[in-house]
Image: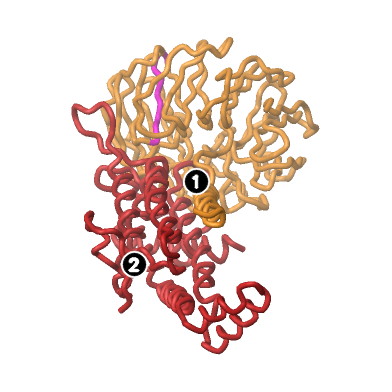
Chain colours: A orange, B red
Amino acid sequence: MNSKKILSLISLLTAAVLLAGCAAGPLVSSWPGVYVDENTVYIANAGQVAALRSADGGLIWSYPAEKGNRYFYAPPAVGDGLVVAGDFAKTLTGLDSANGNEKWSFKESKDNWIAAPLLVGDVVLAPSADHILYALDRNGNKLWTLETGKALWSQPVSDGETVYLGSMDHKMYAADLKTGRELWSVDLGGAVLGSPLLVDGRLYVGTLAGELLALDTQNKGAELWKIQLDGALWATPVIHEDALFIGSQGGKVYRINAQSGAVEWEKDAGSPVVGIAAVVADKVVFGTEAGQVLTYNFDGTAGWTHTINGKLYSGIFASGDRIIVPVMGGDQLIQTLMADGSASWSYTPAK
Amino acid sequence: MWDTLIIAPFINALLFIYQLVGQNFAVAIILFTILIRLLTHPLMVKQIKGAQAMQELQKDPRYLELQKKYANDKQKLQAEQAKLIQELKINPFSSCLPTLIQFPIIIGLYQAITQTMASAPLQMLNLTKHIYPAVLSAADLLPLNSRWLWMDLGQPERLTIPGLSFGIPVLALIVMATTFLQGKLSMPASTTPAEKGKPDQGQMMTSMMNIYMPIFMGWLALTLASGLAIYFVASNLIGIVQYAALGRINWKNLLPSRKSQPVSRK
């Protein structure tokens, strides 16, 4: 075979490989998952889970020590010395919160871990994209499972006796925490993307259909009220003194009366709001797709604004006196701000 | 612009079909592939006819005469060949231009299927931005029903059999088989006359492609989501049907006792 033909063959195969590579796009990718407590920021992004000091952003530990083909995007769950992190290699891992050492791994899921797990006492509740909610003990041993109709992208909530779980199959489920027995389920009319908020026996949950609903957990999830907002609702609403705050994919932010469901004010954020808001001091803080951190006083008057290079899909978090802003596609992975909007430390993982 | 002109329309067409067929994504992929291949069929016909015309030209006595006459003067040879091509009213680009036009369509189809399967939040967010709200309701359609038969269309396919510790990649094997079949059945005629005593290099290259491509496509089917593997199978089978409709298939190439024959024209 002459060199011309060999070159043509190699070119064709190379083109085929590039076609497959370029056309398929990245196989795994999402925005960072974050858990924040008073002293520590835990962030799951790309090949690692890291624990940072919230005071100055110093790295406490990162896992795994060597980056491989595991991708972490689900927000970790943290409690009583245990960090639980799921990855896109279908593995759920239990880590020591002090040093990041692996304690156990659970590999029975048939799909990726996208939602944050929840630690309730000695039970780890882990919703998987394989449609199943797994309940494990603190050593990673399976206790029970609850299967839903579609993928689980939403962290469950619990009052210590009952687990409430939103599913992409449009339903909200209630199950017994000890046994996993389904108690009731209700159809919400849209996929549940974000975790519900449980307050005083009420569940507040948004859907892909752009509806925010209030459900009565004491009456088998009966609908108390429902309102239509502008665009899909990806995040959990936050509550402050009977007012709910939530942003929408339609680029709006809202204050809603938690009792009646009435919209008390609505503001144009300028670009989609996908992540959870944070209540900091006397303000509510939202992050937008355009990289803007927007603050509003509770009466709806605008506060300060800070612009960050990147997309703010993960939400806004508060730790101590700092506002924690995870960033996707920006110059840094985390940017922190003070309560007055001035920049504080930032964090970029070592390459 | 790529998103606006190619990806978004493809995604919406795919979802529209998905809605029509009772939210079966595998069937939607197959029907969408058929639709795109039907729409690009005239281009394929043009391409085959153009390639055929070029092959005929290379056997034309006048063409062969020119090659002998100007064997030592490449510039003159090219000029005279160009005159002959013009005289015979052959368009030299008619065999490759349709391929170039089909290329972005095939990539668009591939990307549309990948993006529609949206197996992570970022992909789902991007997918919702592509949906035309006047035509489709994202809330009603998403997430897609990704399960079909034993497969999760968003995951690489494996058939689990009780007693076996590993899953069998059935779809990858089907992809390999159909890719091989398509290549074998539509093997083109030699583009250059074989020299006495020397093997036909064009045929050799085609034979090598018939080995490498099935292996490569099988590897893709093994590692990528099974929805894409379904697209590969559908595309291969539809390709065979298209070639058969154009009289470009030689079933005798499948017989192990015979060497592969060039496709006979009808």
Mark 2 vs mark 1: in front: 2
**Relative height, residue B139 to residue B9 (above, below):** above
Disc 1 crowd, CA 10 A, few/some/many (<14, 14-19, 20+): some
Q: Secondary structure at mark 2?
A: loop
Left or right: A32, with A103 as reference point: right
Q: Secondary structure at mark 1?
A: loop
Task: Where is residue B162? Give x, y as percent.
Answer: 19, 30
Q: Residue at x 43, y 62 (%)?
A: B136
* Residue for badge 1: A261
Q: Residue at x 38, y 31 (%)?
A: A164
Give the Cα distance between marks 2 and 1. Answer: 73 Å
Residue A127 covered by magenta stretch: yes
Choose top left, top right, bottom left or bottom right for residue B76: bottom right
* Residue for badge 2: B262
Q: Could you say which is closer to the camera, residue B203 or residue B98?
A: B203
Q: Chain of mark 1?
A: A
- Give the amino acid type for the residue marked by disc 2 in the picture: Pro
Task: Where is residue B87? Give x, y as percent.
Answer: 55, 89
- Give the amino acid type for the residue marked by disc 1 in the picture: Gly
Quadrant containing the C terminus of chain A in the rendered view: top right
